[in-house]
Amino acid sequence: MRRIVTVLVLVPFALAFTVFALANRQAVVVSFDPFEPAQPAYTLTLPLFGLILALMIGGVLLGGIAAWLRQGKWRRAARLAQGEARDLRAEVDRLKRHAGEVPAAPLPAGYAPRLTIPPPAR
């Protein structure tokens, strides 16, 4: 299934990007000096498709970082819930052993149940 998605999505995207890059090879000058437009101190000359590609990559990176930062509270809540669940399981096992119902069986190393956190109510 993954190969089909790759062929149906990535191959047309690669072809479209290649056609776009070939059609926009002319050089553009990007100035980083807002105070001297006639003779800027800091300039960069690159092809138009390179500038657009760099801006797209930068936007994806900034969006990913922003999403990661906003989801920090959910990751922290999941860590706390997993720790609490682990502690509660250990306490239940201790109480069962104390009551003599179940012989002691240690949990496998690194065992953690899958927890889901519902999205916030709006």
Image (cartoon, grey):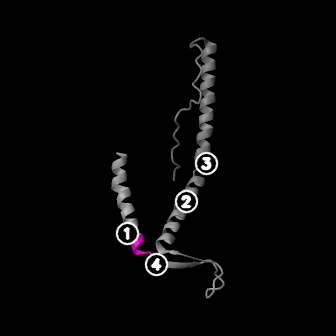
Mark 2 in CB contact with mark 1 (< 8 angstroms): no
25 or 11, which is in the foreground?
25
Is 12 situated above or below 36? above
Q: What crowding class fits label 4: few (fewer than 14 Cα within 10 Å), some (14-19), or many (20 or more)?
A: few
Q: Which numbered dot is residue 73?
A: 3
- Looking at the image, is mark 3 or mark 4 earlier in the sequence? 4
Q: Nearest to the eye among marks 2 and 3: give it.
A: 2
For the point 53% across and 42% down, the residue is 117
Separation (CA) of disc 1 from disc 3: 43 Å
Separation (CA) of disc 2 from disc 1: 24 Å
Q: Which numbered dot is residue 19?
A: 1
Mark 2 in CB contact with mark 3 (< 8 angstroms): no
- Looking at the image, is mark 2 or mark 4 earlier in the sequence? 4
Q: What crowding class fits label 2: few (fewer than 14 Cα within 10 Å), some (14-19), or many (20 or more)?
A: few
For the point 59% across and 30% down, the residue is 110
Q: Amino acid at mark 1?
A: Val
Q: Nearest to the eye among marks 1 and 3: give it.
A: 1
Residue holding disc 4: 26
Q: Amino acid at mark 2?
A: Leu
- Looking at the image, is mark 2 or mark 1 earlier in the sequence? 1
Instruction: Give coordinates of residue 26: x percent, y percent.
Output: 46, 78
Separation (CA) of disc 1 from disc 4: 14 Å
For the point 44% across and 75% down, the residue is 25
Q: Which numbered dot is residue 61?
A: 2
Instruction: Give coordinates of residue 101: x percent, y percent.
Output: 57, 12
